[in-house]
Each structure stands twice: as structure tokens, then as C-alpha cells.
């Protein structure tokens, strides 16, 4: 017997990235697919000590239910840190979420009606498309380039298309690794304020800048209360803690809090108290970030150098100033999906780029992650991947034949 599902279940799509990771994370595969931080850099000893202190002094409270808004000392720490970055943050306008992914989901619940238009970068973070799509959002893809979302194109379309929400990752975007320029930040916030459009500023990577000067958050430029800022400790402490946060206008945070009560009541009390204990202790969070930036910057440099050495000259790729990803555009009409089986045979994996597009799919792109692979292995992985691409170029007639057969339905 097959039970009937709710109509909204039709809009639930599996994550293409998650499906690929089932193959890419085999122990024999050198994977550049998952967007994973380096586990050897997790502050495991400091987190263990924070657990020990919590259980020694406040075990009962740490194992009990708590408020939906989140542990107040943790919200105070987050708000204070954001204030140093120019954001008008306050603990009463800060909500602890189960990772920033829940922040996206809660924002969609309270901002996106069925059929509402959401402007997104094209390509965009696939799990955000998955979440907002489940609420029947209508996506308006806005092209992006090396300076991020093309705000001039959004300005042309926003009023005519009745845009309700703008979603973007302004710093070291997933998947392209690019950063929204300062000029475009100002124009985007001004546009949203003029038209009354909510901006969801998703910033899980902003602390991981290893080149250039930090740019102001969109929330720091907001004087009209149109920006909801999402953050996370998944990339800076450990994703297993599942600690994210949302800051923004009071009425919006309140609506998200009520929505969260219906989802999970609250984020884990123990993890929140552990994170707060760690951040309020003598743990050097700033020094830890410097370590991450140093290691990840070296890995990025190694990947870019190896791409220059092993990829054919016809390929192009982004050169991020931080974050976790490089976006490769393959030559001609090549399809990354067609290369994936050959890459697995070479014991190397990537994520094909087509799943990141909200509009017309593009198939000539791939996303590479450099943070979760040791520096001494990256060059060898790029050599294997370069071999796959070069072989495909040599066999281009074969790829054309496959595509023709697919289009013919054979």
C-alpha cells in the first residue's frame, strides 16, 4: 500500500550534491566533492574540555529543555561579535538555529508564500534552492560573475517580477567562491529598501578570508530593516555542533522563533552551552581562525597552481579570496556529468555544477572543495582530474555522440 503524500511533497527534490557524496566519499576516492571543513583542525580538545566543565558544574541545565530563542550568553557573544563588524545586532534579535541551513528553512517558512518570487544568484547554494523550493517559491535567477550577483540585472527585473525575497551568499559564494563587490552591496541594499524586499544574507564563510580586506556585511549597510543575516559555527568550530544563528528585524526573528517552535522546539541545549563555554573561556577563537585561514589559504594556492599545471588551457576557474570552493568551467560543450564516471575510475571526485542552477541548467561546470584535502594530496588529485578532462577533449567526438543519442531518446 502506498500512502498519499501532501501536495507540497511534489516540490521536495533530493540534493544532487548529497546523492553524489554517496559515491564520492568512498575511502578509496580522493574527494573534492563535499563542502567539508578539515576535521584535523576541529578544536577537539577544547570542545572536550568545555563538555567536561559543563558536566561538572551545570549538567542538569545542559540536559534539560531550554528556550526556543537559544542560550542567552551565546546570543550575547554572537551579538557582540557582529557589533564589532558594524552590524546593529542585539541578543533579543538573535535566534539560535540548528545550523544555518535551518535558518534558511525558517526564513522561507515566514517569508515565502506559494508562488512568491525569490531572486537568487545563478548558480546558487543548492540546499537553499531545495528548501525554498519546498515552499513553492518561484525562482528568478540572476547571473553572477567574478564580483558576485549582477545587481544591475536584478534592478532591471525586481519591480516587474514582483520580487519578494533576495537570497545570496555574499562572501566566497557556494558554489563559485566569488565575493559580492562593495559597490554592488550598496546598490543591493538600497534596491531592497526602496522596494520593500527582504534580503537573506547567508554568510557561513565570511570568517574564512585569507586574501584582501573584509567587506561590510549587507546587514551593516542596512538602515531600513530589510536584511536577515544568517551565520554558523559549522565552518569555524565544528559542523557536528549544529550551531547556527539568525539576526535581523525584531518582527522577523519573532516569526522565525514561532516557526522553530513547531519544528524542533529548540536547538540542542548541551551543544549551545558547550559552544558558549568555549567562546567565553580562554580558548583563542581569533587564533583558531588564523590557523584555519593559514591552512585553507595554502590549500587554495596549491589547488590553483595544480589547475594551472594540469588542466587544459581551454578550461577556466575562479580564484577565491576565502571560503572553501573553486568553480571550474570546462571547455566547449563538455558536460561534467559525462566526466564523473571516468573521474571515479581515476579515484578522484568532484560535484557537477548543473544542480546549482535555478534557471536553465548548465552542464559545463564543476565545483571543487579544497579545505578537506591535505596539501600534499591536492596536486595529485588535480593531475588525475586534468587527465580525465584531457582525455575527454581527445575523445570529444564520442561525447558528442552520447549527447546526440540522449537527445534522440536512445
Image (spheres, rainbow, N blue to C red):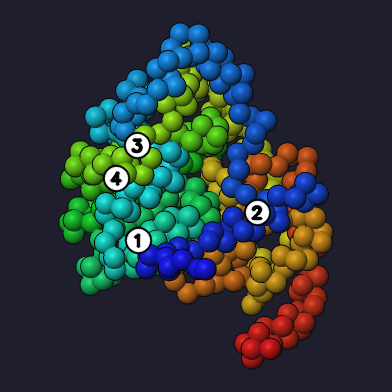
The residues tagged by marks 1 and 2 sit, at their Cα atoms, a distance apart of 25 Å
Identify the mark nearer the N-term, 3 or 2.
2
Mark 4, residues whose alpha carbon is within 10 Å: few (<14), some, or many (≥20)? some
Work out how far the residue at label 3 is from the one at label 2, CA to CA, in angstroms: 30 Å
Is 151 or 239 nearer to us in this picture?
A: 239
Mark number displayed over residue 265: 3
* Secondary element at tag 2: helix
SS of the residue at dot 4?
A: helix
Which of the two marks, 3 or 1, is nearer to us in this view? 3
Report which residue position mark 1 lands on.
Answer: 135
Q: Name the residue under label 2.
A: 21
Q: Residue, x 49% and y 58% (percent of image)?
A: 126
Q: Where on the picture, by quarter, is residue 44?
A: top right
**Residue 335 visible in the picture:** yes
Sequence-earlier tag: 4 or 3: 4
Q: Is residue 44 above or below residue 324?
A: above
The first of marks 1 and 4 along the sequence is: 1
Left or right, 163 with respect to 205, comes to left
Spatial CA distance of label 4 from label 3 is 9 Å
Spatial CA distance of label 4 from label 2 is 30 Å
Left or right: residue 184 versus residue 318 is left
Q: Which numbered mark, 4 or 3, is in the foreground of this view?
A: 3
Q: On the image, numbered disc 4 is attached to which residue?
A: 259
Amino acid at each position: 500500500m502506498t500512502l498519499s503524500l501532501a501536495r507540497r511533497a511534489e516540490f521536495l527534490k533530493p540534493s544532487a550534491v548529497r546523492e553524489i557524496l554517496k559515491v564520492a566519499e568512498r575511502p578509496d576516492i580522493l574527494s573534492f566533492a563535499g563542502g567539508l571543513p578539515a576535521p584535523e583542525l576541529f578544536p577537539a580538545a577544547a570542545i572536550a574540555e568545555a563538555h567536561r566543565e559543563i558536566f561538572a558544574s551545570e549538567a542538569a541545565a545542559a540536559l534539560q529543555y531550554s528556550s526556543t530563542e537559544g542560550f542567552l550568553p551565546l546570543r550575547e557573544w554572537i551579538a557582540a561579535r557582529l557589533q564589532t563588524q558594524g552590524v546593529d545586532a542585539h541578543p533579543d534579535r538573535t535566534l539560535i538555529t540548528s545550523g544555518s541551513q535551518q535558518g534558511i528553512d525558517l526564513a522561507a517558512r515566514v517569508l515565502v508564500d506559494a508562488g512568491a518570487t525569490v531572486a537568487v544568484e545563478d548558480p546558487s547554494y543548492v540546499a537553499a534552492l531545495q528548501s525554498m523550493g519546498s515552499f513553492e517559491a518561484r525562482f528568478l535567477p540572476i547571473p553572477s560573475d567574478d564580483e558576485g550577483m549582477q545587481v544591475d540585472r536584478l534592478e532591471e527585473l525586481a519591480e516587474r517580477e514582483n520580487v519578494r525575497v533576495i537570497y545570496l551568499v555574499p562572501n566566497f559564494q557556494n558554489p563559485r567562491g566569488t565575493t559580492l563587490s562593495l559597490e554592488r552591496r550598496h546598490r543591493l541594499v538600497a534596491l531592497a529598501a526602496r522596494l520593500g524586499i527582504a534580503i537573506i544574507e547567508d554568510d557561513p564563510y565570511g570568517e574564512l578570508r585569507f586574501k584582501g580586506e573584509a567587506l561590510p556585511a549587507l546587514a551593516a549597510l542596512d538602515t531600513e530593516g530589510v536584511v536577515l543575516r544568517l551565520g554558523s559555527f559549522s565552518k569555524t568550530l565544528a559542523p557536528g555542533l549544529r550551531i547556527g544563528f539568525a539576526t535581523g528585524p525584531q518582527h522577523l526573528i519573532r516569526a522565525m522563533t514561532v516557526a522553530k517552535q513547531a519544528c524542533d522546539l529548540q536547538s540542542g541545549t548541551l551543544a549551545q552551552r558547550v559552544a558558549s563555554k568555549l567562546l567565553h573561556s580562554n580558548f583563542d577563537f581569533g587564533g583558531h581562525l588564523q590557523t584555519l585561514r593559514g591552512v585553507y589559504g595554502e590549500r587554495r594556492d596549491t589547488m590553483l597552481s595544480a589547475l594551472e599545471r594540469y588542466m587544459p588551457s581551454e578550461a577556466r576557474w575562479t580564484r577565491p579570496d576565502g571560503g572553501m570552493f573553486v568553480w571550474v568551467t570546462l571547455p566547449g560543450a563538455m558536460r561534467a556529468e559525462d566526466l564523473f564516471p571516468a573521474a571515479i575510475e581515476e579515484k578522484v571526485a568532484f560535484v557537477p555544477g548543473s544542480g546549482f542552477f535555478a534557471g536553465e541548467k548548465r552542464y559545463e561546470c564543476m565545483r571543487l572543495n579544497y579545505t578537506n584535502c591535505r596539501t600534499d594530496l591536492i596536486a595529485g588529485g588535480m593531475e588525475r582530474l586534468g587527465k580525465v578532462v584531457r582525455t575527454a577533449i581527445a575523445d570529444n567526438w564520442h561525447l558528442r555522440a552520447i549527447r546526440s543519442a540522449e537527445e534522440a531518446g536512445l
